[in-house]
Amino acid sequence: MVGTYDRELEELLRDREGVVRIAEALRYLSPGALRWQLTSGRWQQPCHGVVVAQSGPVSATQRLWVAL
């Protein structure tokens, strides 16, 4: 069963093309869970304070979200 926070995080990621600030991600994930996403290669950190919730190339739209 998907928890409320899981659904809220999924919605946030969908609305922002998979790009969120670390502070926002930590509202839904523990620091250890976020670290695991990054160290496992499932997510990436293109710049300080921002993560992209995918392992593939960052799209042009995602780069714009990162810049915000």
Image: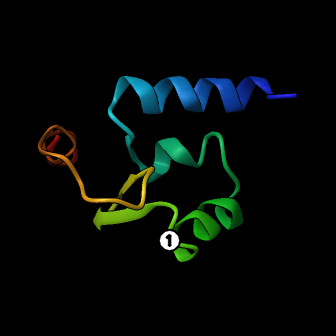
Reply above or below: 5 against 24. above
Left or right of residue 6: residue 62? left
Reply above or below: 4 against 53. above
Q: Residue 12, percent across and down?
A: 47, 27
Name the residue: 60% across, 60% down: 34
Reply above or below: 31 against 11. below
Q: Nearer the viewer, residue 61 or 33?
A: 61
Name the residue: 39% across, 64% down: 44
Q: Residue 21, percent across and down?
A: 39, 47
Say what secondary structure mark 1 lies in.
Answer: loop
Left or right of residue 22: residue 25? right
To which quarter of the image does residue 18 belong? top left
Quadrant containing the C terminus is top left
Few, some or many residues within 10 Å of mark 1 (<14, 14–19, 20+): some
* Residue at mark 1: 41
Amino acid of disc 1: Gly
Name the residue: 51% across, 68% down: 38
Q: Residue 4, percent across and down?
A: 75, 23
Q: Please, which colouring scheme is shown?
A: rainbow
Name the residue: 66% across, 24% down: 7
